[in-house]
Image: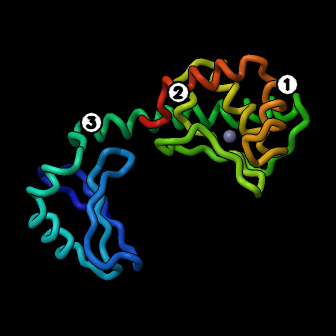
């Protein structure tokens, strides 16, 4: 549920059976998010919001509603570009080096460029579309190598190195960028 608020813009309300009280946080889009117990009504959620206004203002880095919208737009554009590129690039390298994976997922987490799960699903962050191609390819090769090694062991790095001899430099350069928007 979304509450439109004069001051904070769109406020995301998440109902959860796990929550007892009300918890405020910031979503990845910079919006205010509140977790409330399962049957909390909109009326009640608004009341909680109003009574915590001062606290929220002081403690949480909420983005300006205009900035929230700009970020949404940027995400949409990136997602579109990513969809037309990343799955194909992944497929290209997989074929080239003889890997087989189950699925390619696109993500927009704030902290990870990619991941590889034990069910052979590779997730790639749409933020990869913002960084240099060499680094983007490195991330893809890194995740493909995880299909054979689910750790960062010596063998894992040897495999990454066999496809990307500059992997150490790439790993280091990657730290200058952040996957979040
Ligand atoms: Zn890794």
Ligand 1 has an atom within 8 Å of the beta carbon of the residue at disc 3: no
137 with respect to 32 (left or right): right
Quarter of the picture for ligand 1? Answer: top right
Element at badge 1?
A: helix
176 with respect to 91 (left or right): left
**Foreground tag (1 vs 3):** 1
The x and y percentages for residue 63 are: 24, 41
Where is mark 2, residue-wise?
Answer: 175
Mark 2: few/some/many CA within 10 Å (<14, 14-19, 20+): few
Mark 3: few/some/many CA within 10 Å (<14, 14-19, 20+): some
Work out how far the residue at label 3 is from the one at label 2, CA to CA, in angstroms.
Answer: 25 Å
Ligand 1 has an atom within 8 Å of the beta carbon of the residue at disc 2: no
Work out how far the residue at label 1 is from the one at label 3, CA to CA, in angstroms.
Answer: 43 Å
Label annotation for residue 170: none
When the figure is inspected, residue 149 is found, relative to residue 51, above or below; the finding is above
The x and y percentages for residue 129 are: 56, 27
Residue that appears at 88% across and 28% down: 96
- Image quarter in which the N terminus is found: bottom left
When the figure is inspected, residue 122 is found, relative to residue 91, above or below; the finding is below
Q: Earlier in the sequence, mark 2 or mark 1?
A: 1
Residue that appears at 20% across and 57% down: 4
Name, please, the residue furthest toward the right: 98
């Amino acid at each position: 549920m979304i509450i439109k608020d004069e001051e904070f813009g769109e406020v995301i309300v998440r109902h959860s059976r796990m929550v007892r009280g009300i918890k405020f946080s910031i979503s990845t889009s910079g919006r205010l998010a509140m977790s409330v117990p399962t049957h909390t009504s909109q009326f009640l959620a608004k009341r909680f919001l109003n009574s915590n206004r001062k606290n929220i203002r002081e403690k949480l880095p909420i983005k300006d509603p205009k900035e929230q919208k700009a970020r949404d737009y940027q995400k949409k554009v990136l997602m579109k570009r990513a969809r037309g590129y990343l799955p194909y690039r992944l497929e290209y390298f997989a074929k080239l080096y003889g890997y087989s994976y189950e699925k390619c997922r696109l993500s927009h987490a704030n902290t990870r460029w990619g991941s590889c799960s034990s069910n052979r699903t590779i997730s790639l962050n749409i933020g990869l579309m913002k960084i240099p191609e060499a680094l983007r390819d490195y991330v893809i090769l890194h995740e493909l190598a995880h299909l054979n090694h689910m750790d960062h062991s010596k063998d894992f790095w040897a495999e990454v190195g066999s496809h990307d001899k500059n992997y150490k430099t790439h790993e280091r350069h990657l730290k200058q960028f952040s996957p979040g928007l």
